Amino acid sequence: MSRLITWAAVLVAFVAVPFYLEGFWLQTGLFAMSAAVGAIGINLLTGATGQLSMGHAFFLAVGAYAYVSFSDDLGLPTPIAAVLAVLLAGVAGGLFSPIAGRLRGAYLGIATLALIFGGQHLLFNVEHVTGGFNGRAVPPLEIFGFAFADAPELILMNVPFGALERLWFLGGALLLLAALFARGVLRGRPGRAMNTIRDHEIAAGVMGVPVTRYRAGAFVLSSMYGGLAGVMLALVFQRTVPDYFGILLSLDYLAMIVIGGLGSVGGAVIGAVFVSLLPQLLTRYSDALPLVSAPGSGGVSPAEAARLLYGAAVVGVVLFLPGGLLGLLRSLRLRLPSLPTPLPDTRSSHVS
Amino acid sequence: MITFIELLVNGISIGAVYALIALGFVIIFKATEVVNFAHASLLLAGGYVVARLHPYVGFWLALLIGIAAAAVVGALVEFLVIRRSKAANHSVLAIVTIGVDIVLTTELTRRIGTEVLAMGDPWESGVVHLGPITIAQTRIAALVVAALLITAFLLAFKFTGWGVAMRATAEDPETAALMGVRLGRVSLSAWAVAGGLAAVAALFLCVFPTPGLDRSSSLAALKAFPAAILGGLDSTTGALVGGLVVGVTEALMTGYQNDLAFLGRGIGDVAPFLVMIVILLLRPAGLFGTKELARV
């Protein structure tokens, strides 16, 4: 019952946000949603299966650019282009599976650096698809005549509903679907198999888990999540630029899942919100904060301060909070005797 | 033909520098089983110290201080972070080093800003003529220094007590500990040595013909990762061969990029990674890596 109330409150708050907050926060929130989808994907791979990937940004790029190219160059309807873009990211992950299936843990992490550098090379050089250095404009999504853009004016309860407000609900729905699906995967048979592979590869093999196939499968699934995150990001940004999809973005995703909590959906979402809100908050309130100064003034700029903070957060979390922020929340909840606590879920709370 | 020989020599020289980085990477992996993603930032730290100090104390002293600084940074990372971490999973330890890397690289690139720092080396832009072949003095110095350092390291690895302790630890940490090897010291020294090697490599990555140390220098260091893994992460021989393969490939691809125009501009920077992928497809453990066999 209390759970139902919590979820209802979350839903009401979510619906209320576009009516009260300004565009800046909506955009930040949308970035966080897209990051959350991507982080769920990489948490399936790195957190649950123990396979490190530095190439996540590549799959975001595939999703974003494929969406633009399918809808603009091929003239496909935008929803179909979006679905195809996610599938294409999956195919790209599948093409990498001879390596993703065979290499273990951190080895795969180094091998996936090739995706980042190769991907950047393609983004800059295949200009007729990617637009080269300047990138390309992203056509707005249009579902059954309803455009996720500012163009046909729409006013709800005296609030103008532009692209950001409309995308807010789409992003929320996509994030919910992505989270539910990933939870299903993690709690079911595949999730158990993935965790066993992470904890003991040989034991997994002995129990009859096809290790290579599962690793490749987790890689494909995570790359599809990356593709979806890329499509969402492109829709919010309204422009795709190659520089964005570099190694720093991949590192951000790894930071997210470590800070949030490895191996669970909730951890990925919390980490994604933390890592994407931090720079925005610091930028917004840089005047009021000590040690942070405006960009270009020689001091620590907000973006740099954010990177320093969450780099340190990654180290701190691994040293002191081996369950991430999610683990911290759980242990706080267990310490409060008055609240009815649901039975601890041993599977998803198992974090190494 | 002359171009080819010049490119080959340059490739071998830069490959020797990559080998230095990869060697440090492999030493850390052998001693602590940590894949050190912070290696590029160790390199940047060493290079930064050299570049900032040489106008005041002269090049050679600056280089010594730079090497010492990078070694101390490496040792501190081991002492403050890796040793304290209770994470059993080595993937998690690898991610910790990513956190360290984010912090160090952000701070160093912030300090470097948009500047391009000269390294103040005595070779400057001098060249040596061998018949029709022209080679930069820096490249020769890089080759000689790298060869000397690698030889010295391999000899120490083979014959000194420190080397024996290191190899014993890599073989079986528990038994080594029971035999009186201090595991903490072994891993601390591994990180320090790796840091020092990275600082030397930083010097030669940032001298002529490259303009100097700038904020993208750590990206150049990332090419040593394919060098380490294509040779096999647990093999010092592999690191040397991997470094040379990466260096020569890069130099040749960059040198002939006009003939390879269909591959796009800047293919030389991507080539090391492509070679790595091809080799990993054929031999997932790398060229000289120990194959882990477990039949189920």
Image (cartoon, coloured by chain):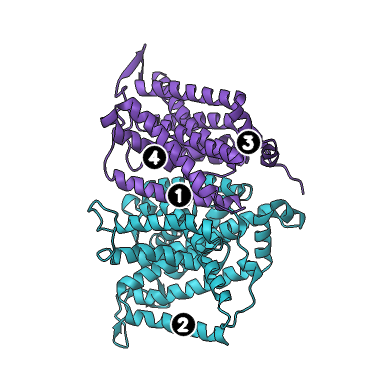
Chain colours: A cyan, B purple
Say what amino acid the circle numbered 2 marks: Leu
Q: Position of residue B243 (x, y in %)?
A: 50, 31
What is the quadrant of the N terminus of chain A in the image? bottom right
Disc 2 and disc 4: Cα gap in Å?
47 Å
Disc 4 and disc 1: Cα gap in Å?
13 Å
Badge 3, how many Cα within 10 Å: few under 14, some, many 20+? many
User: At 40% across and 47% down in the image, what residue appears?
Assistant: B104
Secondary structure state at the residue bearing disc 3: loop
- Closer to the camera, A208 or A332? A332
Both on one chain, marks 2 and 1?
Answer: no
Q: Position of residue A327 (x, y in %)?
A: 55, 67
Chain of the residue under label 1: B
> Which residue is tagged 3?
B289
> Which residue is tagged 2?
A11
- Closer to the camera, B280 or B36? B36
> Which residue is tagged 1?
B100
Disc 4 and disc 3: Cα gap in Å?
28 Å
